Amino acid sequence: MTIKDNIIIVGNGMVGHYCAEQLIMHGLHETHQIHVFGEERHHAYDRVHLTDYMSGQDALALRLHQDDFHTSHGITLHLNSRVTDIDRAQKTITAEDGCLPYNTLILATGSRPFVPPVPGNTGTAGLVYRTLEDLDLIRAAAEGARHGTVIGGGLLGLEAANALKVLGLDVSVIQLGSHLMPAQLDEEGGRALKHRIEALGIDVRVLHVTKEIVAGTAHRHKLVFADVTTLETDMVVFSAGIQPQDMPGRACGLEIGPRGGIVVDNQCRTSDPDIFAIGECALWEGQIFGLVAPGYTMARTVAALLAGEADAAFTGADMSTKLKLQGVDVGSIGDAHGQEPGSTSYRFIGEAEGSYRRLVLSADGTRVTGAVLVGDNSYYDTIFQYVQNGIAPPADPAVLILPRGEGAELLGADALPDTATICSCHNVTKGAISTAIEQGCTDLATLKADTKASTGCGGCSGLLKSVFEAELTARGMTVDKSLCEHFSYTRQKLYSLVRVHNLRSFED
């Protein structure tokens, strides 16, 4: 019997699981023995939609695969098993459930929340928002509580604030910097977002430095700020950024960046050619990517390389994101901060409704390079395609962000080339959607299941639906939108049942 080479993935989060899927897609599970190690007791789950768990959805509904995924593909899954040692000389890993040799090692260990060294940040004053276990602790702390505070006004901080609001608490958000979501929004966009979130009854305090947490009088805890003001609260959730979980690489002597992160090249190789790093633990050209889409791109790169595609490379990632925070639309596209030399901007500020839009162009005005949107993401899909596909802007670029009726018409699906990326997370193009339709796909839920489009962060759902309907119409098929939406919703519920109960098909 031929002994198969071992591929070991350390990390069973979204990126680690997606990497296993990509190895399977390339048939590597037939030629290699694949092991996946995860520190958590849970199977891989959707971290992007953790708030759904707080609103009553169980952990199974967030699971990313069917129960028999690993066994049916001959993959050995090691849950609740932390890798404690990597011996590069012997090419072995040691975990809490044993020692294994590897031929190829893929580190997908992700990141951990950064908790500032604030005195008193323990117990219900030192919670974080990262895993299902973290959310269980938050939910337990909310019992009998009236007020919750989140320290950190970035993307995850606002998600955590939403989770506390779902639990019925009054909520405060404490931000060290001058505005919310500084990684995605400029200062004016951050101010617009603050205005909208405050209108929802959430207390937002910017430029506040938490010096210590002490016992409260009316509530469990009291935050003491540098300006000597205070805030009483029953629980504190830290979401002040992330740190790459690089300890496994650091301990075995891999090259680590000055501020952390396992250094990788364009093929996601570390300083050891037999070890790769992908996702939030990887440092590429001085960057740590904190979104799921870049991690997926890294995973595709590594799987392709291991399958023999020598030219596969990771050359950066689109950090555009569209989401709804606390019921408020927020969008960030491309070079949202206008960092490209010579960039120029157009801005629309709607003070009456609290909206803000910024369009960024190249120095010569021939390219749309980025955008910031607060309050209305209906502009997102059009601007995203201008940025992604290098479509020449209108003679007056400002029309792209003017109010509807004054601005340009939405960019129709028929204007997009087949190479246009519709879903960044799973690299699904308009051409792939057309191919799926040619092969008989006639409903949106099946399209999502077949191509995985809009199953990552979900930000492309509106554009996907628009392209799908346009492609059906172009083939002379009548699209009943109300029926399509209802059927898609129903089918998604069925997919959830299939996944949760491990049914073989809808017929079961």
Image (cartoon, rainbow, N blue to C red):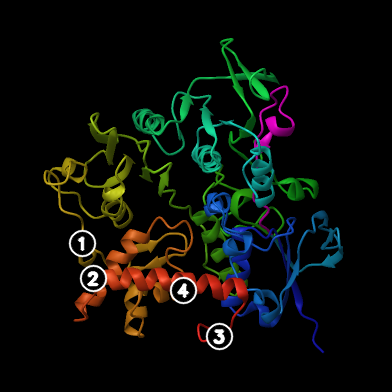
Q: Quick check: 386 above or below 28?
A: above
Residue at image point 29% right, 32% down: 354
Q: Determine if the magenta segment contains residue 319.
A: no
Say what secondary structure mark 3 lies in.
Answer: loop
Q: Which residues are magenta?
A: 107-127
Does 6 sit left or right of 375 as displayed?
Answer: right
Does 504 sit left or right of 249 as displayed?
Answer: left
Q: Amino acid at mark 4?
A: Ala
Q: Determine if the magenta segment contains residue 117.
A: yes
For marks 1 and 4, give the CA distance: 24 Å
Nearest-to-viewer mark from 3 and 4: 3
Q: Amino acid at mark 1?
A: Gly
Quarter occupied by the N terminus: bottom right
Residue at image point 32% right, 41% down: 373
Is mark 3 in CB contact (under 8 Å) with mark 2? no
Mark 3 sits on what residue?
A: 508
Is mark 2 in CB contact (under 8 Å) with mark 1? yes
